[in-house]
Amino acid sequence: MARALSSMVLKGIAGIPAARSSRIVCGSFYDNGMRYSTTVPSDPDTHQDFRPTNKLESGGVSLKDVVEQDVKENPVMIYMKGVPEFPQCGFSSLAVRVLKQYDVPLSARNILEDPELKNAVKAFSTWPTFPQIFIKGEFIGGSDIILNLHQTGELKEKLKDVAASQERSE
Amino acid sequence: MGSRGATVVLSRANRIKAKLQSVLEATALEIDDVSYQHSGHAAVRETSEGETHFNVKIVSPKFEGQSLVKRHRLVYDALADELQSGLHALSIVAKSPQEAAAKK
């Protein structure tokens, strides 16, 4: 439902050709109370690429602060390509699949939406690739590592005191 | 490494191999270009000649006692130039010589 509606909105307001929007997942996602929107709310004048798709920068908060806050406030934080419901890269998809095996809340940011955020995260963790997973504020690694930790049982250990994800209705 | 007169351009796989061998004193190395597996990928469209995604299996004494994150960081640091010039992702299996022997 939401998808059809928002693609109508996209085409109606901004007249963006379908090819462009195919890279971007329509709609908004609610994940653990954080709202991730991939649609431009209004303003057809500004090209989508130049417009921040979230309120991060306009609040006067640096991206580094955002990243620090992300990893502090969310016990499991993943910076990935795409969103958990729709990953846009095999490695990101794998990481999400591994994490979903555990009953923990998963917070995610789509670094494809925001090149500045992508660079900020890379600088923060001094890690050049995505996905990047943080657990309880600690940088864990990429998809290889998270899979390995899952296989050895270490991931279970790390996540055992992370509160189970709350039941929520969408 | 070619001399000045003859410009020998090594493939990225070979460059990766050379760097990992010298920087990490690798005792075993396997490099596979798997870019074709990711060819529909958003970022790959920019560099269409492949050489963007590799599987790396490396055994090095430098990995001994190091966490996975540290080992991967060592590999990424050794390949920093490649990562700046179109290398997009690596699947890394990094073992110490003892671990490699144990597995076999």
Image (cartoon, coloured by chain):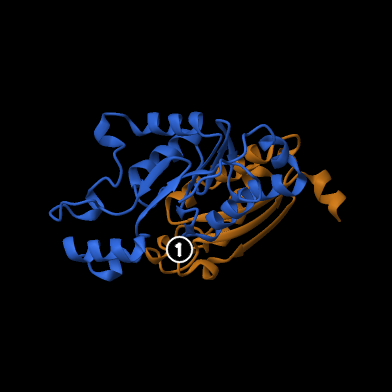
Chain colours: A blue, B orange
Q: Residue at x 40, y 64 (%)?
A: B47
The count of marks equals: 1
**Location of the N terminus of chain A (image quadrant):** bottom left
Residue extending furthest toward the left? A45
Image coords of residue B86 (percent x, y) = 43, 56
Image coords of residue A112 (percent x, y) = 39, 52
Dot 1 lies on which element?
loop
Q: Residue at x 50, y 28 (%)?
A: A72
Q: Specify the subunit that label 1 lies on.
A: B
Q: Residue at x 43, y 49 (%)?
A: B84
Vertical arrangement, residue B64 with respect to residue A9, above or below: above
Q: Is residue A14 visible?
A: no
Q: Nearer the viewer, residue B85 or A168?
A: A168
Q: Nearer the viewer, residue A150 or B99?
A: A150
Q: Left of A29 or right of it: where is B24? A: right
Neighbours of disc 1 within 10 Å: few (<14), some (14-19), many (20+): few
Quadrant in which residue B60 is drawn: top right
Q: Left of B25 or right of it: where is B81? A: left
> What is the three-letter code of the residue carrying label 1?
Thr
Vertical arrangement, residue A112 with respect to residue B47, above or below: above
Residue extending furthest toward the front? A169
Q: Is residue A43 visible?
A: yes
Image coords of residue A54 (percent x, y) = 30, 43
Q: Left of A144 or right of it: where is A58? A: left
Image coords of residue B1 (percent x, y) = 55, 57
Q: From the image, tell me which residue sits under label 1.
A: B7
